[in-house]
Image (spheres, rainbow, N blue to C red):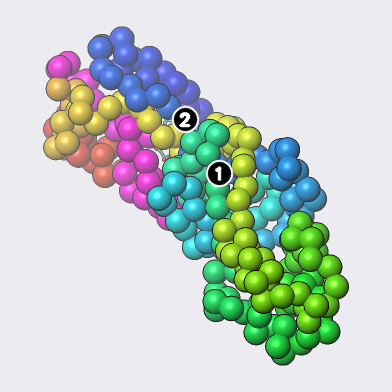
């Protein structure tokens, strides 16, 4: 879109505080132990993804570099390097579903039980990771309950994001404390206004960033 960091440079030149900009609403990359999930590129599933205290129940998409899809883009705005992202892979499954599956289909494998609820290749990868081979009937309820809680809190350790090249927005920017909330004029510099993406305001997915760009632009436009 032609966006650069020039607004931040200009703001700094006039002594305004700039909160460190970083990419947000951005896919996360996986490496290390999580690398085998990259083989699921193209597979999507409805999940609940969590980073810190924020959770989003939407689709996640596995990509050849890691994780994307609305649930991941949303949590990326709350994720900090070094922190985990926790994913409930079966947010709609009732508690005890795996033990119920054992009662209903004792001869089935864990992979088959997962395959009834999740895309086939994802079920296969998860079953491999859970390492509980054989028939469900041979697995104790305790083991199945443990597997169920792991599936409800699957921990990924992203090693980064796809960066500004793929980010939809920037977290950080010109500090809101430096600006009038009525007109967007800089409190300490006459006739200097900052609006939209340049300001430290970040919205969720769903049009809120456009809304902020237009609304703040309109507010400034009223007084210029
Ligand atoms: C791929 C993608 C998808 C997105 N999807 C959504 C979405 O679905 N919903 C949503 O709400 N938000 C979305 N966003 C975010 C949204 O586009 C931005 O928040 C919004 O466009 C910011 O508006 P802005 O006017 O502040 O900045 P910009 O739209 O970046 O406009 C800045 C303009 O300034 C121009 N410019 C830069 N330097 C100079 C200069 N020196 N002289 C003159 N002109 C200059 C640039 O060319 C550009 O036209 C998306 C962003 C991306 C990248």
Q: Mark 1 points at which residue?
A: 84
**Residue marked by disc 2:** 22
The magenta stretch spans which residues?
188-212
The overriding secondary structure of the stretch rendered in magenta is: loop
Question: In which quadrant of the rendered view does residue 21 lie?
Answer: top left
Quadrant containing ligand 1: top left
Residue 38 vertical position relative to residue 122 in the rendered view, above or below? above
Q: Is residue 99 above or below residue 46?
A: below
On the rendered structure, is 79 left or right of 173? right
In this rendered view, identify the residue nearer to me: 34 or 5: 34
Give the percent coordinates (x, y) of residue 125. Answer: 78, 59
Question: Which badge, 2 or 1, comes first in the chain's sequence?
Answer: 2
How many discs appear? 2
Counting from the top left corner in percent of width and height, residue 207 is at: 40, 52
Q: In which quarter of the image is the C terminus?
A: top left
As for residue 193 lying within the magenta part, the answer is yes
The spot of residue 25 in percent (x, y) is 50, 44
What residue is at 59 percent from the left and 78 percent from the top?
Answer: 96
């Amino acid at each position: 879109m032609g966006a650069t960091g020039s607004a931040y440079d200009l703001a700094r030149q006039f002594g305004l505080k700039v909160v460190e900009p970083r990419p947000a609403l951005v896919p996360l990359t996986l490496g290390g132990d999580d690398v085998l999930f990259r083989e699921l590129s193209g597979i999507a599933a409805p999940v609940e993804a969590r980073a810190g205290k924020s959770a989003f129940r939407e689709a996640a998409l596995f990509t050849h570099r890691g994780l994307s899809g609305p649930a991941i883009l949303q949590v990326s705005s709350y994720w900090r390097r070094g922190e985990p992202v926790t994913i409930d892979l079966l947010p709609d499954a009732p508690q005890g579903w795996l033990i119920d599956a054992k009662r209903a289909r004792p001869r089935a494998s864990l992979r088959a039980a997962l395959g009834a609820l999740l895309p086939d290749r994802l079920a296969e990868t998860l079953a491999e990771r859970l390492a509980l081979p054989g028939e469900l009937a041979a697995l104790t309820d305790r083991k199945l309950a443990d597997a169920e809680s792991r599936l409800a809190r699957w921990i990924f350790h992203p090693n980064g994001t796809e960066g500004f090249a793929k980010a939809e927005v920037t977290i950080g920017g010109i500090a809101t404390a430096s600006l009038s909330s009525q007109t967007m004029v800089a409190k300490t510099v006459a006739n200097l206004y900052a609006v939209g993406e340049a300001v430290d305001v970040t919205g969720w997915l769903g049009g809120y960033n456009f809304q902020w760009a237009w609304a703040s632009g309109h507010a400034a436009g009223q007084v210029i």
